[in-house]
Amino acid sequence: MVPSLPFEHERDLIADDAAVIYTHRPWTELPKLLSLHNPGQVWYSPDCIVIHQGSRSFYLIHYSATKRVLKARETTEQLGIKPGWSVGSCARRIWQWIGHTQTFNRHARQWVQPGWHFLACKPGRYDTAALYDIRSAYYTLLTYANGLEVYPTKTGIEWAVCSGKAWERFQQALNAVWHNKPLRNSLVGTAWGGDGIATAWCRGKRIQIPMKPGPLRPLAALIVRSTFELCAEAFTQTNAVYAHTDCVITPSGTPPQCWTAHGLDYKTEATGQTDIVACGVYHVGEKATLWWNKGARWPLPIQPPPLPKHLLHHDWL
């Protein structure tokens, strides 16, 4: 099935059910446009647009996502799994192949209440500072997991025993995705799944479809919450002036000892003169973010959120 496309010269067929789109049109506007030319539903993701027609689907991959999508497909195929046409769909198929779910999810939402990412920013210029970053934070914590099911207890958390086959496949998947950053991060995101309403298009009209939860929300929530806490601890311990998810910038030049204490590998990304403007807008030594290089200079401070009273990562790391 090759759908009707209003821009035939801007696509390159790479499979019976997929094509790469070379277009400078706004990506978010294409689903509505495509739905006017094709029956069925048109779904959007950062990697690809999916046109569903009955039991058949066709995938349009954005040219900028081609490399990461094909790499995710290759990694998924190495596990003997039929891959999808986006990084997220490959990750979801890996979880399906692992074949384990945890349906009790109430505590998972409580674990992520402090926030998905620890953010803090004190704009200013510093004669010298150091940027420290945990290597593969989410993936590393996944490798520390003692099971696929995790529950809260009065004294901490408890891991439940899963089948030997599921655990073996989980370990195989971790080994396979090690060199694929987008896919290994997507494993955590797809384990949590979707929240709220997804938007699709049909005959030019927007439709809303409830999103489905992932198979292992508590595990994903524990990974995210623990990363949040580790970043917060490092921010306080090093007197940092900037923090984002799994990295800190500190004028003291003191490495985060709390990361070392938990056996986490980290790297010194950069050192030197520092200019912090806002979240995602800074330069440290020779390292500068995209928006700093583009000239963004409007300071936007972010006060660090308070830490939860009970730190979950102390219960299992």
Image (cartoon, rainbow, N blue to C red):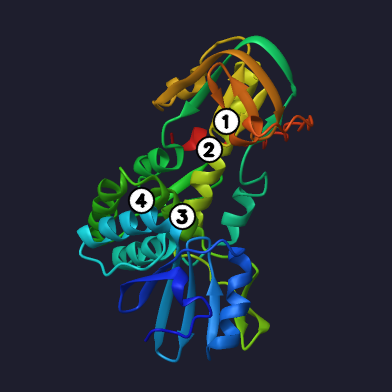
Residue at the image point whose x is 25% and y is 46% from the top = 175
Mark 1 to mark 4: distance in Å? 24 Å
Residue 206 position within the rendered picture, expressed as x and y whole percent measured from the top left: 68, 81
Q: CA distance from mark 4 to mark 3?
A: 36 Å
State yes or no: discs 2 and 1 in contact (Cβ < 8 Å).
Answer: yes
Q: Which amino acid does the dot numbered 3 rest on?
A: Ser
Q: Is residue 134 above or below residue 83?
A: above
Amino acid type at mark 4: Gly
Q: Nearer the viewer, residue 195 or 72?
A: 72
Question: Which residue is labeled 1 in the image?
Answer: 231
Taking the spot 56% from the left edge, 80% from the top edge, the residue there is 34
Camera-nearest residue between 272 and 35: 35
Disc 2: which residue: 227
Q: Amino acid at mark 1?
A: Cys
Label 2: state its secondary structure: helix
Sequence-first disc among 1 and 3 = 3
Q: Secondary structure at mark 4?
A: loop
Q: Do the CB atoms of the residues marked 2 and 3 lie less than 8 Å apart?
A: no
Q: Tell me whether circle 4 and circle 2 mark residues in contact (CB < 8 Å).
A: no
Whole-Å distance between the Cαs marked 4 and 2? 18 Å
Query: Which of the two labelled residues, at mark 4 and mark 2, occupies the earlier sequence position?
Result: 4
Q: Which residue is mark 4?
A: 147
In front: label 1 or label 4: 1
Total labels: the figure holds 4
Q: Where is residue 42 drawn, in percent x and y? A: 54, 80
Can you give x and y, in whole percent of width and height, for residue 253 in the image? 56, 10
Q: Residue at x 32, y 58 (%)?
A: 70
* Viewer-nearest of discs 2 and 3: 3
